[in-house]
Image: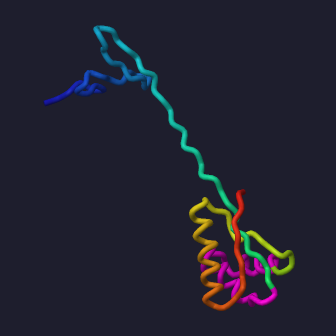
Amino acid sequence: MSRARGSNSAGARWSGTGNRERLVDGQVVVEPKTKTKTKRPSLYRVILLNDDYTPMEFVVELLRTVFHKPQAEATRIMLHVHQNGSGIAGIYPYEIAETKVRTVEQLARKAQHPLKCAMEPE
């Protein structure tokens, strides 16, 4: 069983312009093709906050494991946090940023370090 190209069982068909044509009460009704735009998710900065007790090596290791930073970049970010009081560890969509903040604070607590992490809109 074959069907005419561009039509369906309800009698609607697609025109060459991408519009949908259908028959209503003997009249051809043309429905314009609608375009949907995908909105990019809002991004959030994940920020590490400096303290006087968390070892620098621990912060570098967090940046490597949680944020997947190479050694050199992790060291650079850690020094920025140390010298400036805070620094951006990464920029992510909300759910990912929230998870990274929670992971950092759980790992710091488990290692008995007071390291804090925050997030803010980009």
Looking at the picture, the colour scheme in use is: rainbow
Residue 66 image position (x, y, % from top left):
61, 77
Is residue 68 within the magenta segment? yes
Residue 25 image position (x, y, % from top left):
29, 10
Is residue 118 within the magenta segment? no
Q: Residue furthest top?
A: 26
Mainly helix, strand or loop, the magenta region? Answer: helix
Up-down relation of residue 109 to residue 39 (above or below): below
Up-down relation of residue 83 to residue 13 (above or below): below
**From which residue to which does the magenta span run?**
52-81
Q: Residue at x 43, y 26 (%)?
A: 18
Q: How many marks?
A: 0
Residue 53 image position (x, y, % from top left):
78, 90
Question: Which quadrant holds residue 64?
Answer: bottom right
Q: Residue furthest left?
A: 1
Comparing 5 with 21, the one in front is: 21
